[in-house]
Amino acid sequence: MERREFHTLGKVTPRKDGVARVTGQERYTVDVSLPHMLHGRILSSPYAHARIKSIDVSAAEAMGAVVITFDDIPHVRYNERIITIPAVLHKDHYILADKVRRMGEAVAAVAAETEELAEKAVRAIKVEYEVLPVITDPIEGMRPEAEPIYDTVLWGEKEIEIENNVACAREVEEGDVERAFAEADVVVEGTFKTTKMYHAQMEPKSVVCRPEPDGGLTVWPTTQSIHNVRILLGEIFDIPLSKVNVKRVPIGGTFGSSIQMNPPIPICAALALKARRPVKLTLTREEDAHDHTRYGVQIHLKLAAKKDGTLTGAEMELIADIGAHNIQAYSFLGVCVGWLVSLYKLPNVRYHGTAVYTNKAISCAMQGFGNPQVTFVTESLIDELAEKLDIDPVELRLKNYVGMGDTFWGQGPLVRSIVQSDGVPELLRQGAEAIGWENRHPPPPCPPLRGGGERHRRGIGVGRGFHTSSAGAPQPGDVIDFSGAMVKVNIDGSVDVITALMDHGGGTLEALAKLVAEALCVPLDKVNIAPGETRSTVYDCVTHATRGVYAGGGAAVKAAQAVRQEVLETAARYLNVMPEALTLTLDERLGQGVVYAPAIPDRRMTLAELATRCWTESWKTIAAVESYRPVHCPPAYVTVFVELEVDTWTGQVRTVRAAMGSDCGTVINPDMAAGQLEGGLSKGAGYALYESNEWDADGQLTSGGYWIDAKTPSIGESPYIDDLSVYFAHTYEPSGPFGAKGVGEAATNPVAAAYANAIYNAIGIRFYELPITPEKILEAIQRFSESVNERGNV
């Protein structure tokens, strides 16, 4: 497709689901209520690591509750995330714990007539535990004397032993790394740490399961992939997939927390199958906070460069804290090196990644799947390198970034393609102008003394990053990535789009409607996104990897193009004109798509007339179903410029203003795309400055509060939208639907680095650990003051 004027794309339009959402009429999983439905509750372990010696459920059953324990479930080990291909998929998980490996792990569950009775029954269950030593530090966990969390797990279908709590490891080496560093003029390096943090999505995980008379299941889940839930439930309970129907239900945000099949889903299914009645199971906020986190990592990175700023090589060692279960660690280790080598041209690279089990909440994807961590590290070192070389940080980035025509690794060594659209220079130049980069002062020659000097110091920082639009590549890798869609024309000329693609709340399905409206030349209000379920949709892998518009939209456009061709061929028979002589356009006056022959203007039919004739003459429905495998994963570039103020007496950081630019190709929904950037800045600021989960030595989660201990930014701590400049690069992605690629995760990935660089510019202290809290800032200032006093300079 070539760039052209669009009648629907790029226009601000009311959201199709907007009224339902703002009036409370949208039906989420917690709103699903079925006749004769029971209510479920989970018995969670109070310990982080323990053997289960006995469970007494008699008191709960005496109350009339249905109870399940490990003895009642299929003893099938599985992985909750099945985007990784089966051959390299680690499986260490049962529906209920065979052994407790984290605080809050489910050891039993009940279903009862009311929520109150279910809570009373679950509290009546008596469990005898043998408490085991707890591992909360992955470095300590790798010591030979550390308590093993697992003895064996499945890798594919093969049983493998787990040594020193190492779940898996990956190594990559290309080029001559030793030579690159030996011949470098400048080397910078550092060890960085990022925290495990709670996703804090608005909707806790919930599910409703109904057993069917034929032995099947109908499921209403919180999930990012209805088809993967179906596949896993069929595998675990040995039910033919034709008897498992999973409904697409609106979700209240996920940030990646539901990329896998959530633990409540198979627990609820087991309860429903035993009770032979529908069951609803919803996690409390506290239970949800114990269930999932972002990967915490320790990264040591070295960069080598010539005097002119040309990067020559990199060496990275990464240790990931994956928590109690291996959801996707093998893929995580692979993508992390992909993020590094796709940020900057590194002809020589050596990488070693290790994933380690700990007795903490499970690590899973969260807004970037390792990209924010790697980008924070890389962008911090790029700033250090620029300072050592006395080169402007923006110019150093422009000199070395992976851009047009370069090989782009995307999500790891097996996901490589060529960059075909590149708005990075435009984004950096426009952002620098918007933030006043030319007036940026150098960092102070010495940090402030605590309680003295200038109290409020301002700084400006930059971070650039990207995310892949899907995980597509010329050849299949170790990640499954394809989508499907059906498009059909109704007899009134309206159009239905049937897809399994999930919308996290950001307007992905709205984008699909616009893409189909554009392809078929019909008004947007005549395009309907039909309710979806696994029995009526073709497979879509999962809404992740910023793939919704690019891959999900690519499938919808592919199906719409097939419909368009069928429209032309069908109209050709009625109009007695060759199909090649016909075209399809939108008649705004009629509010209809019209097929006509430009050379014979009176030969025309509306879509409604065409579909109606096909119906009245008992011929056919004009429809198409298509699957789409992307062979590219184009980078959705984002740049962030932040000006902030550091209060050196309190350690507080205030965002003064910011400029964010996105290269997402053709902008489908301008207001929603801007909203993605605004949300990315807010979430990135939380990652940089506030948010963290902490565990004590016994593996107890100490940051249990939603807004207090495990703090997320409040309104007063979020960047003011009035002080945020949002802009888009003028690019067109040739492999994307109508030139579009993603925004999503890219909006968050570089934000923490921009904040870290701005804080350094403000006070001359660089931080290597996130979050950069007021306490850490004050501690760093205090250490400097003490060192000055010790030298006798004060």
Image (cartoon, helix red, strand yellow):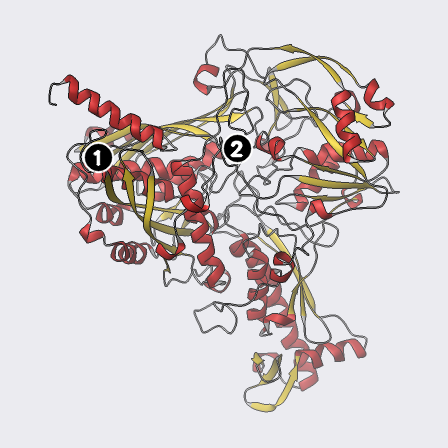
What quarter of the picture does the C terminus occupy? top left
Where is residue 298 shown, x and y percent of the image? 39, 27
Badge nearest the viewer, 2 or 1: 1
Q: Is residue 316 above or below residue 523?
A: above
The crowding category of the residue bearing disc 1, from other C-alpha atoms within 10 Å (few below 14, some 14 to 19, many at least 20), is some
Q: Name the residue under label 2.
A: 293
Instruction: Give me the C-alpha separation between circle 2 and circle 1.
Output: 32 Å
Do callouts 2 and 1 mark residues in contact (Cβ within 8 Å)?
A: no
Apparent side of residue 682 relative to residue 500 in the rendered image (left or right): left
Q: Earlier in the sequence, mark 2 or mark 1?
A: 2
Q: Which residue is drawn at 76% across and 42% down?
A: 241
Secondary structure beneath label 2? loop
Where is residue 284 shown, x and y percent of the image? 65, 34
- Disc 2 marks a residue whose amino acid type is Thr
Apparent side of residue 706 relative to residue 608 in the rendered image (left or right): left
Q: Name the residue under label 1.
A: 764
Q: Say if residue 467 shows up in the picture.
A: no
Q: Say if residue 566 shows up in the picture.
A: yes
Q: Is residue 678 above or below residue 284?
A: below
Q: Which residue is drawn at 70% across and 44% down?
A: 30
Q: Quadrant of residue 87?
A: top right
Q: In this view, does 563 lie above or below 509?
A: below
Secondary structure beneath label 1? loop
Q: Residue at x 52, y 21 (%)?
A: 358
